[in-house]
Image: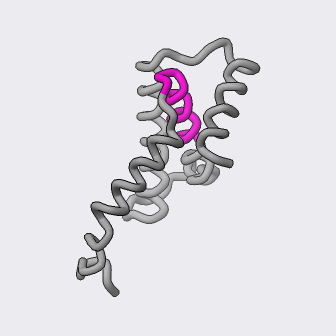
Amino acid sequence: MSIKNCQKTVDNWIKKNGVRYFNELTNLAQLTEEVGEVARIISREYGEQSKKPSDKNLSLGEELADVLFVLLCIANQTNINLQDEFDKKLKIKSIRDKNRHKNNKKLIT
């Protein structure tokens, strides 16, 4: 599914299942909370932090999807076409960073 279609799907879901979008500040707080949950999982799964019994049912994929959902909400309510913005950003990065990482000794194994 394209980003544009994802935005439309989220908008339809909000209209059908939600009363309205949370305001932008609430969604920013929600986004921060969800990113924190992603960080918690990564620090325990891939980092050095010990897992807790309450971490047993945590899912990185589910938390990343939560981040994406809130991000799409913010884009919708601020009239940002994320598909266009992503495509522009990828083009910029492709030109700017074309050779940037090829000689990075930290990345070459």
The span picked out in magenta is 66-79
The answer to whether residue 44 is magenta is no
Identify the residue shown where x is 42% and y is 26%.
Answer: 29
Q: Nearer the viewer, residue 103 or 62?
A: 103
Left or right position of 47 against 55 = left
Q: Nearer the viewer, residue 51 or 12?
A: 12
Q: Position of residue 83 (x, y in %)?
A: 53, 42
Q: Position of residue 102 (x, y in %)?
A: 30, 78
Identify the residue shown where x is 39% and y is 59%.
Answer: 49
Left or right position of 23 against 5 = left
Q: Is residue 90 above or below residue 69?
A: below
Q: Is residue 46 above or below residue 102?
A: above
Q: Nearer the viewer, residue 51 or 101?
A: 101
Left or right position of 69 against 40 = right
Residue, far top: 19
Q: Position of residue 94 (x, y in %)?
A: 37, 62
Q: Name which quarter of the figure residue 65 lies in.
A: top right
Left or right position of 99 against 49 = left
Identify the residue shown where x is 69% and y is 33%.
Answer: 9
Identify the residue shown where x is 50% and y is 30%.
Answer: 75
